[in-house]
Amino acid sequence: MTVERNRAQERGDVVVVSNRLPVRLVPGARTPRFEPSAGGLVSALKGVEGVAGWVGWPGAPVAAGARRQVTHALAEQALHPVFLDADEVEGFYGRICNDTLWPLFHYFVDRLRITEASWEHYVAVNRRFAEAALAVAAEGARVWVHDFHLMLVPAMLRAERRDLAVGFFLHIPFPSSEVYRLLPAREEVLRGLLGADYLGFQTADDARHFRSACLRILGLDSQPDSVQIDGRAVGIGIDPIGIDTVSFRDAARDPETADVLAEFERRYEGQTLVLGVERLDYTKGVLQKLRAFEHYLEQDPERSRTTTLLQVLVPSRLESPEVQAQRDEIERLVAAINGRFGRPGITPVEYIHRSISRSELVATYRRADVMLITSLRDGMNLVAQEFAFCQTVPGLPRRWNGVLLLSELAGAAQVLPGAVLVNPWHVGGIVERLAEAAVLTQEERKARLETMASRVAQLDSRRWAATFLSRLDTWARRRRRSRVATPLSEASRRRLVKRFARARKRTILLDYDGTLRELTAHPELASPTAEILDLLVDLSALPGTQVHLVSGRDRATLGRWFGSLPVWLSAEHGFVERVPGGAWRQLLDVDLKWLPRMERVLRRVASEVPGTHVERKACAVAWHYRQAEPEYGAWRAKELLLMVEQLLPGVPAEILLGHRVVEVRAVGVNKGVYVARLFPHGREHNHLVLAIGDDQTDQEMYAALPPGSSSLHVGTGHPLGPTRHQHQLPDPESARALLRELVDVVRPTA
């Protein structure tokens, strides 16, 4: 596969998957005609090398009879359309992307409209995109999925093609876990994203919020650069997107731009030009900017003679009544300001509501004295980078007069150290910064611009894309080198059931918590249900079948819950055992002098961390923190590990990490000791041995199985143990369903 993958890279193996293609279909044309799509993503990926194809929506509904012709026309540009009908566009893009995900991820909870029925459209459309990408991607290809429209696609790709290197980049903010938890499909989205090998975010805050959501919602611990799921590590990176500096440099040097700039110089001679360039969207804070400028003029009405605010507002989804209302409110405020402070020949706010050419845009950037960006929340805001770069284009005259006033709530605030930061909600603060910008010295302006221009050059979109893909390669290689359990396929399930039915003798080894029974907030709440008890009885009743519960639970609890059943019990990770109807018997003689001291350490920590408790066992002591505040509990667990490690040298004890539990147990005690005693001479002919567990302690059980045994791992657990035929089940419910199927396949002949 490595050779095939290298060949794929040589011929160009990157498949880009985004909501829209880099071109959009022009409606109404007799033959398919396309025009370039707008947006930062298209610009950012212009220079990416090795793109084999781009999957996306062509930007307009296409009649069924015309789809083949459009597909053929786009194929000439290595573009692969995903066609959506009007209902899908409304449900997927309108209801979910615009009305649910966009306001939620930008912290506008008051605008959040959750339409659960439309979620089916989101899932279905994501699957269509995934299927289109699978059809295009060569063996070992890199598939790069973009933005919040397609957050389920990575997991869909992973389920079908493990050979693919899957990357995902989120262009908008990822909200704090408290806000994110409002999403009904919160788990589904997280698992969708975690199908990737590598996830890129704009800022460190976004990455931290994502990791926090994984911990609080899925219970997944993480490192600063990764999250563990399904026995593999998903890379987490901070990859702030940049602009296409080459295209902006060329535009700045274009004679047409020079002509427009000369016109602007004449028009605004002697004026301080404050510039705003935004897309029409409530997240951009245009109203806050206008109110701040109004207050700026109120402080000194004479400023209306010397200062002009040029506000460029690019149209966006004007068919939406909500967007039309935003536009109308902005225009009313512009008119009110001009009515109050304008005079014949003086217009304090010049308002442009249309798309402007690249030459006009660059010329306004170069002429502006102040760039004012008051985004209420922004993933990055490339306008800030465009301004800083255009003010300092190499080889062109430098006026060194531009000051960037930038919202501290935009991602760009974390990557442009020369910007003057403002709180967009603090009108008085914006006014103060505007006044300060007017009197900054040329030396300070120059120093700030040079600092920002240098950073913009480092963030160049070509370099951004190359860095992202390099990191994707690294994490994909790590996954391919690791040995992890594979999901139990239908074919593997059928083979296991057939072997179980034909076996003359059967031994079933089962963990309890997290395997047969879902994990609970407190261990005492995990008592077996009637379904579990009946299942164990039915399994034990099968001819030639032994059922062994191999658990970390203490003997008293196991005896109380399962002592009346015809099953073998192994408690405290193999320290003691009990045959059906018999007495408990200790298997090992160990030194436990260290145990009281270690218990005191754990109890002291439990007294300091609400929601935690200590469990004392015969040969171990455990600190449980499932009920603790997730992030604080995880932090204290790491502290506890360091503390215990300092106490362990020379002590016959070891640390055991389970799911939200830190346990210290005697050396030599593990589930493998119990399992090995069951098979002193290996596995007999036609003897099926099956082990099912869910965490690191069960790897010891798998390791002790005789050759030819099978093991199943439940949940998102740990990397593959030494058994050859290990598969994965998603949850305890799936494990119970499989065991019930095994009972039913044998019972008719019993």
Image: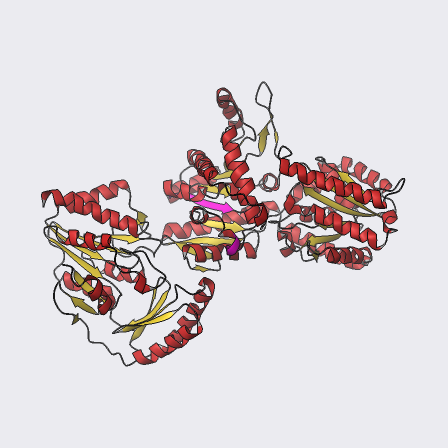
Q: Residue at x 51, y 54 (%)?
A: 237
Residue 574 at what x, y percent from top left? Answer: 22, 67
Q: Residue at x 52, y 57 (%)?
A: 208
The quadrant of the image that shows the N terminus is top left
Q: Nearer the viewer, residue 338 or 363?
A: 338
Relative placement, left or right, of 13 versus 31 is: left
| 103 over 408 or under it: above or below | above
Residue 84 in view here: no
Residue 641 lies, in percent from the top left, at 40, 71
Q: Is residue 571 magenta?
A: no
- Left or right relative to 48: residue 708: left
**Residue 165 painted magenta:** yes
Q: Position of residue 585 (x, y in %)?
A: 15, 71
Query: Please, is residue 704 above or below residue 598 in the view?
Result: above
Span colored in magenta: 161-179
Q: Nearer the viewer, residue 280 or 522?
A: 522
